[in-house]
Amino acid sequence: MQHNLSNIALTLLTVPDIRNIFREELSAYFGSNYVPYIQSETDQLLNVDEAAAFLGLKKETLYGKVRRREIPVNKQGNRLYFSKTELTEWVKGGRKLTTQELDVKASTFRRYKK
């Protein structure tokens, strides 16, 4: 009995290796138009309910911030989507300076104003 070795697979591939093989095969099958959508934890898209829960806001408050253009949002048709990364950066951007940081800024300002 003769065995066809191309059908036998002995491997120690990791899950990421297998994923890469699948991506390569899909790309070869679909051609250059295939762009795999890879979503990491940080660039996850959230709907209104998820974004409100993530930020600890009521949905009405979130809608108000969207209406006043106070928060980063993407709109597709009637649906709103929020990037988890952008929301995190938005929250970090609202960080208040500590008293020590304010003192340093004030002394620097006074020094250069003279």
Image (cartoon, helix red, strand yellow):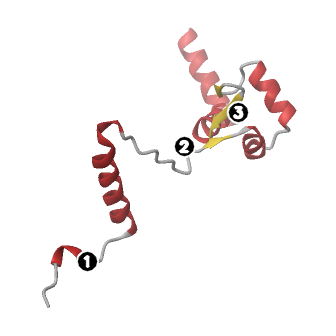
Q: In this view, does 28 lie above or below 68?
A: below
In depth, the one of 7 and 73 nearer the eye is 7
For mark 2, does the 10 Å Cα neighbourhood hold few (<14), some (14 to 19), or many (20 or more) residues?
some
Residue 96 — which label?
A: 3
Label 2: which secondary element: loop
For mark 3, does the 10 Å Cα neighbourhood hold few (<14), some (14 to 19), or many (20 or more) residues?
few
Viewer-side label of 3, 1: 1
In depth, the one of 75 and 98 nearer the eye is 75
Label 1: which secondary element: loop
Is tag 3's residue or tag 2's residue first in the polypeptide sequence?
A: 2
Specify the quadrant that holds the C terminus: top right
Q: Name the residue under label 1.
A: 9
Q: List the single residue furthest toward the front.
A: 1
Viewer-side label of 1, 2: 1
Specify the quadrant that holds the N terminus: bottom left
Q: List the single residue furthest toward the left.
A: 2
Looking at the image, which residue is at 77% across and 18% down? 68
Kindly check if marks 3 and 2 are in contact, taking CB atoms under 8 A apart as contact: no
Tag 2: residue type? Answer: Asp
Looking at the image, which residue is at 23% across and 79% down? 8
Looking at the image, which residue is at 63% across and 31% down? 93
Q: Distance between the residues labelled 1 and 2?
A: 35 Å
Looking at the image, which residue is at 75% across and 42% down? 55
Is tag 3's residue or tag 1's residue first in the polypeptide sequence?
A: 1
| Residue 54 % position (x, y) | 73, 46
Q: Distance between the residues labelled 3 and 1?
A: 58 Å
| Residue 100 % position (x, y) | 66, 36
Q: How far apart are marks 3 and 2 (CA)?
A: 25 Å
Q: Mark 2 points at which residue?
A: 43
In depth, the one of 31 and 44 nearer the eye is 31
Tag 1: residue type? Answer: Ala
| Residue 25 % position (x, y) | 30, 54
